[in-house]
Amino acid sequence: MAVTAFINCFAEFVVLFFSLYLTQVLGYSVAKAGIMVALLELVHIPGSLVGGKLADRLGRKKVMFFSQSSMGICYLACGWFLRWEYAPFLIILGKFFDGITDPAREALETDITRPEQRQAAFSMIYQSFNMAFAIGPLFAGLLYNSHPRLLFLGSGVMQLVVVVIVAVKVKESLPSQEMVEKSKTGGERAGDGSTLNVLASRPQLLWFSLGVAFCAFSYRQVTFSLPLQVTSLFGTGGTNLYSTIISLNSVLVVFCNPVMLKVSRKHAIVSNLVVASLLYALSFTLFGFSTVVWQFYALTIGYTTGELLMNNNDRAYRFANTPINYRGRFSAVLKLFQSSGRMAGPLIGGFVIVRSSFQWLWVATGITAFIGMLCFARLASYEGKKPVLCSFCSENKKRV
């Protein structure tokens, strides 16, 4: 699954160049291209909801095979009809199928791992994504300039390769009725009734999802507000500074993730989430008071450390408290909180910048991350202990 995650993320470079394809190849205006890019993100949400339900009803592999094959075919067709005026809608349709694929993939990854393995397993998959993201855009940039058609055709072929690997190497993992009946205790105990009723019976997941939403809103400012801030401070040099900031983040993620995984496995998952959101709050607040280049680099190290802790623990907590027979649906529903935070980031961030200043924006961003930390701290009451920060620094080996 880690290998397929690498190939899948590498193949998704089509999305990165979608706006350039619209404006440079098809001659779209910037405004019209913006609407199409927004539509590209929007269709992923209903796709995810459909995929979550199908994955729990029909099976993880079946859904993943159908949806990812369909996505690959859409990308191949777009490459073949590259200059057709309706070709962009093939990519948008492919993104809808990608939405169907995601909850099925996550449920499959969870089914085939035991709770005590998930921090390491999800960390390895996260590492695969980041390695692909580090080299995929470079390769795609060269290919787009010389052979744009191959960009889409190659992406479609790689999506189909992923389907073949999963079909051959991974067994269907949909829990049987016997497994569902046996899992009546613990955080992953089976549930009955509608998705909303089952979710309401697990308030810890609601607090967790709120924390993720607030932190997603805060992190979104890195890609929206930070480039605007550094260019306003340093002019044309700000573009190079922002590029090196993102590169530093990618390098730290790739090389420091094993170290952070080793550290986080020594402590409770809830404590790791609290520390991660606290690092977000401190780093993002201080961005508002930064005026020197080295300060931006130092704070990048700070928020990247939080990012590593967050990504090594959030999925592990989510699925440790998700009913075994609702993994697909819960994956889709709970991700709506994260998507909401990401979508709200540019909207609210732009409003604050226009009405006030970057400094006030980053202070508000830090406060938002701090609220996320309080939501994660609330999870401790459901575990029967307090995730105080000193526990993170202790020798306690217990895990949530």
Image (tube, rainbow, N blue to C red):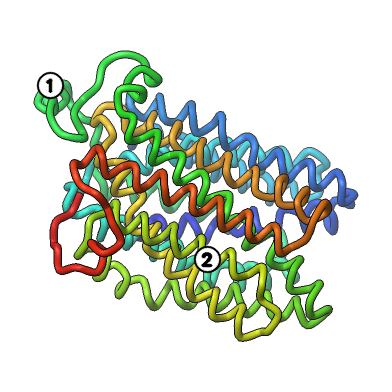
Identify residue type, mark 1: Glu
Q: Badge 1: how crowded within 10 Å, few (<14), some, or many (20+)?
A: few
Q: Is residue 19 above or below residue 177?
A: below
Residue 114 is situated, as x and y percent measured from the top left of the image, at 17, 47
Q: Is residue 223 left or right of residue 127?
A: right
Q: Secondary structure at mark 1?
A: helix
Q: 343 or 143: which is nearer to us?
A: 343
Q: Which mark is residue 351?
A: none
Residue at (51% x, 66% y) in the render: 282
Pointer 2 residue: 133
Q: Is residue 363 above or below residue 110?
A: below
> Does 35 sit left or right of 258 as displayed?
right
Residue 309: quarter of image: bottom left
- Is disc 2 in contact with disc 1, using a CB cutoff of under 8 Å? no
Q: Is residue 80 visible?
A: no
Amino acid residing under circle 2: Phe
- Residue most toward the top? 193
Q: Determine which residue is flagged by label 1.
A: 181
Alpha-carbon span between mark 2 and mark 1 = 41 Å
Residue 341 percent across, percent down from the top left: 57, 44
Q: Nearer the viewer, residue 349 or 46?
A: 349
Question: Which x, y percent locates residue 14?
Answer: 64, 55
Residue 230: image quadrant is: bottom right
